[in-house]
Amino acid sequence: MGKKLVMAQKRGETRALCLGVAMVLCAVIAYYILGTTMLPLYQKSVWTQKSMCHLIETNIREQQELEGKKVPQYPCLWVNVSAVGRWAVLYHTEDTRDQNQQCSYIPGSLENYQAARADVENVRATFHKKPIFYCFSTSRENETSVLYQRLYGPQTLLFSLFWPTFLLTGGLLIIAMVKINQSLSILAAQK
């Protein structure tokens, strides 16, 4: 009976050690992937200054075409604001600015024109309800655009690093508990 218990305990410890090592390896791989994808985007983002934006005007531009993608023509929103003491164009995110510089907001659903138009009207109404809001600007002197929302801000980076950190911590705890259990069983066997 005692020998069967020791063998089962050894198999369980081996499995627990393998689980802990696998969790640590997965965390290292996740850190590598995040370090090569998210971190450069975060470091390249120049939109670091939080400013107050005052709405100047909004226009709905009809029949825009998205560069580089095969989608039907769609409506988009053009927003001019006053930020950091100068006139600027507001863009929803960094990607919006890269996709089409003629649009401040590109609707999510581009297939249905009426749904896209309703989405743009809704966003426009939201801006008119609250004409003063926070936006992100850059310290560059000649920059005439600001962002409503940063895609690659510190909160996004921390949220992305949470699960790999949780995985690494859990794996190390499992390994530590198995090693402590092994050393305690050796001490108990020596007595």
Image (cartoon, rainbow, N blue to C red):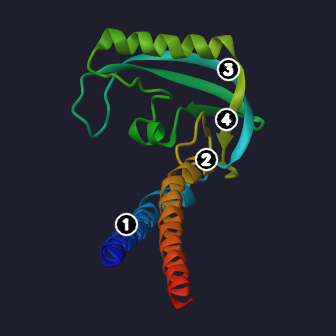
Three-letter code for the amino acid on which mark 1 is drawn: Leu
The residue that mark 1 highlights is: 19
Residue displayed at 68% across by 21% down? 55
**Closer to the camera in the image, 85 or 104:** 104
State the CA–CA distance, disc 4 to disc 1.
45 Å
**Closer to the camera in the image, 43 or 68:** 43
Structural crowding at the residue carrying mark 1, measured as other residues with C-alpha within 10 Å and reported as few (<14), some (14–19) or many (≥20)? some
Q: Are marks 3 and 1 in contact (CB under 8 Å)?
A: no
Nearest-to-viewer mark from 3 and 1: 1
Does residue 88 appear to the left or right of 91 in the view shown?
right
Q: Are marks 1 and 2 in contact (CB under 8 Å)?
A: no
The residue that mark 3 highlights is: 56
Q: Earlier in the sequence, mark 2 or mark 4?
A: 4
Does residue 46 appear to the left or right of 21 in the view shown?
right
Three-letter code for the amino acid on which mark 2 is drawn: Gln
Say the numbered circle drawn on residue 135. 4
**Closer to the camera in the image, 123 or 188:** 188
Screen quadrant of the C terminus? bottom right
Q: Earlier in the sequence, mark 3 or mark 2?
A: 3
Screen quadrant of the N terminus? bottom left
Three-letter code for the amino acid on which mark 3 is drawn: Ile
Three-letter code for the amino acid on which mark 4 is drawn: Cys
Q: Position of residue 34 (x, y in %)?
A: 45, 60
Nearest-to-viewer mark from 2 and 4: 2
**Closer to the camera in the image, 90 or 3:** 3
Give SS at disc 2: helix
Residue displayed at 53% across by 61% down? 165
State the CA–CA distance, disc 3 to disc 2.
29 Å
Q: Position of residue 174 (x, y in %)?
A: 48, 67
The residue that mark 2 highlights is: 155
Q: Position of residue 65 (x, y in %)?
A: 31, 28
Residue displayed at 52% across by 38% down? 93
